[in-house]
Amino acid sequence: MERPISLYLIPTPIGNLGDITLRALETLKKVKTILAEDTRKTGILLKHYEIQNSLQSFHIFNEHKILAGLVKRMKEGEVMALVSDAGTPGISDPGFLLVREALKNDLNIECLPGATAFVPALVKSGFPTDRFVFEGFLPHKKGRQTMLKKLSEEERTIILYESPHRLLKALEQLSEFFGSDRLVSVSRELTKLHEETFTAPVKEVLAHFQAKEVKGEIVIVIEGKKGEPKSTDDSA
């Protein structure tokens, strides 16, 4: 007999509320409790779709404290859904700890497909999509330069997340570690009214965003390092 689902991981729109799936809406309506990174933000989504289920906070500042209690409730039969502010839970958002603990306790989990910001940014960049590496947010201080130096040698397409107030610093560092001619694609406000994607050598991308006020969540896609050309000398 198949075990019932105890926890649903439900992607939510990264901007445009119309991007939520019918299945996500149906699932949000049927679960007993919705765990949300920010109840105010999720409340807007639920109100828009007239969903009135119980809403509870679950974020990086309380997840360790309430984890055991949530697992206990699911083991007793309560069905929950986890959503983050935008996109898929667990992708640079809370979710990993709850999933790991639920699996340890033999609870059944289902993850619905849906919005994730880096996918449209990657596809729109025009860079190779067959092989890529997703690094999420770089360390703010300790280990940041070490990571940048390592990534500068990466031949696969690289995807990073960044906040608007740190974008210029990130682009300056990319120019320093990757070279000012490395191609970079920056997407912001994806799916929203003022969506923008700008793709060019990093020196031009930096100049573009230095000349304007930057708003919205940022996805940076970096072309991988070009491999050394193979020798055509067959004399050996």
Image: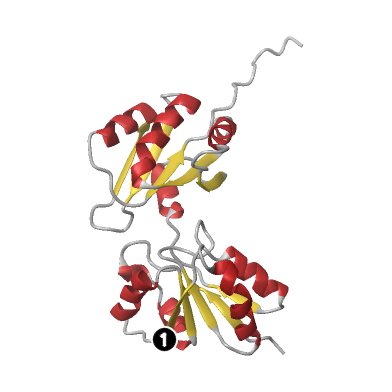
Whether residue 130 is visible, yes or no, is: no
- Residue 213, image x, y percentages: 24, 42
Whether residue 53 is visible, yes or no, is: yes
Residue drawn at x 23%, y 34% is 211
The mark tally for this picture is 1
Q: Quadrant of the C terminus?
A: top right
- Residue 110, image x, y percentages: 58, 75
Is 17 located above or below residue 73 in the figure? above
Q: Which residue is mark 1?
A: 53
Q: Residue furthest right?
A: 236
Q: Nearer the viewer, residue 135 or 146?
A: 146
- Residue 62, image x, y percentages: 52, 68
Q: Residue furthest top?
A: 235
Left or right of 7 on screen, residue 31: left
Q: Nearer the viewer, residue 103 or 199?
A: 103
Q: In what element is the residue under mark 1?
A: loop
Give the class, few, some or many, for how many residues have Cα within 10 Å of label 1's Cα (few <14, many ≥20): some
- Residue 3, image x, y percentages: 68, 86
Is 197 located above or below residue 177 in the figure? below
- Disc 1 marks a residue whose amino acid type is Asn
Q: Quadrant of the N terminus?
A: bottom right
Residue drawn at x 66%, y 71% is 101
Is 52 located above or below residue 196 in the figure? below
Q: Nearer the viewer, residue 144 or 84?
A: 144
Residue drawn at x 47%, y 79% is 34
Q: How is the image coloured?
A: secondary structure
Left or right of 50 on screen, residue 76: right
